[in-house]
Image (cartoon, rainbow, N blue to C red):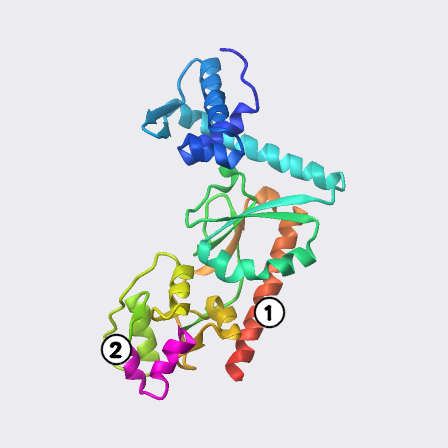
Amino acid sequence: MSRITLNALPTFVAVARHQNLRVAAESLHLTHSAVSQQIAGLEERLGFQLFDRRGRRVVLNAAGEALLRDVAPALARIHEGVQAATVAAGSKEQALRVTMIPSFAQRWFLPRMASWRAENPGIQIEIDASPEVKDLQREGYHAALRTGEGQWPGLIAERLYDGPTPYVAVGSPALAARVAGKPLEAIAREPLLGERDLWKRWFRAVGVEAEPVPVAMFSDLSLMLQATEQDLGFSVVREMFAADALRQGRLVKLSDTSFIHEGAYSHHLVYPPALKAWPPLLALRSWLRAELEASMRSLKAQRKE
């Protein structure tokens, strides 16, 4: 077996992650042919195939799986070492890779990016908005913002806020005006978006007997809120995700009544134990907590108005 080159290994991990040479090439900012040549060269030096070719997809075979198990964590440790060296050298520019669900990214995190940059001008942040639960160490992420019970093997998970957050029913100003002044029962005859169970909980909270039948379901909360803002129907959402739109007048509450969904998952900051004291992660943790506390205070103030 010939000696393999180190620069082929990140390419191997990217192809294994995406199972597509073109997509892997785009993620690495390389050409398709360059990635293909690196993989072919790596397999030639090893003396065996790492992938099975299935049309446009490339799928890890048993040998590839075995290699990935050790190579991905090793590359992650190298990346962490480089970051630590950067900190020790006093470099002003640092990079932080964070993955989070799209709804959190679009409805809460991105509107506060200016605040992050103002407070942390020396920390670059790369955001991956994906519904997939990424393997942080294998895929080179420093942290994740996830919803769940807070138990992810091998990772530290810190709950980002205390207690459950209220759910409210919202609509666009135009659609809400159509039911203004009418009994709340009238809302059940309007187009409803989202989960039937959440609507049933809301109607119970406002004292209305109704059997809601939503006209559309969404796999992503941000899409549902976008549809709500575009007059396509009413929705029931976690108040913190609608807070900015409510404050800016893009959405209005259908009632001041809210309800607590005890079974709803909380949001957590998740990261590898080795990064617990890493300054960029400490900065992210501090900023998240401060911004979430400010959001909660703002929501309480809005309820009193």
> What span is colored magenta in the figure?
169-187
Taking depth in this image into account, of 172 and 263 the one nearest to the observer is 172
Pointer 1 or 2: first along the chain: 2
**Residue type of the residue flagged with mark 2:** Arg
**Residue type of the residue flagged with mark 1:** Ala
Q: Quadrant of residue 22?
A: top left
Identity of the residue drawn at 40% across and 33% down: 19
Q: Which residue is mark 2?
A: 189
Q: Quadrant of residue 149?
A: bottom left
Identity of the residue drawn at 24% across and 70% down: 213
Res. 69 visible in picture: no
Q: Is residue 171 magenta?
A: yes
Identity of the residue drawn at 64% across and 47% down: 124
In this rendering, which labeled residue sits more in front, label 1 or label 2?
Answer: 2
The circle on residue 182 is: none
Tell me: residue 224, above or below residue 270: below
- Secondary structure under tag 1 reads helix
Q: Which residue is mark 1?
A: 294
Q: Position of residue 111 (x, y in %)?
A: 56, 61
- Mark 2 Cα within 10 Å, few/some/many (few <14, many 20+)? few
Spatial CA distance of label 1 from label 2 is: 36 Å
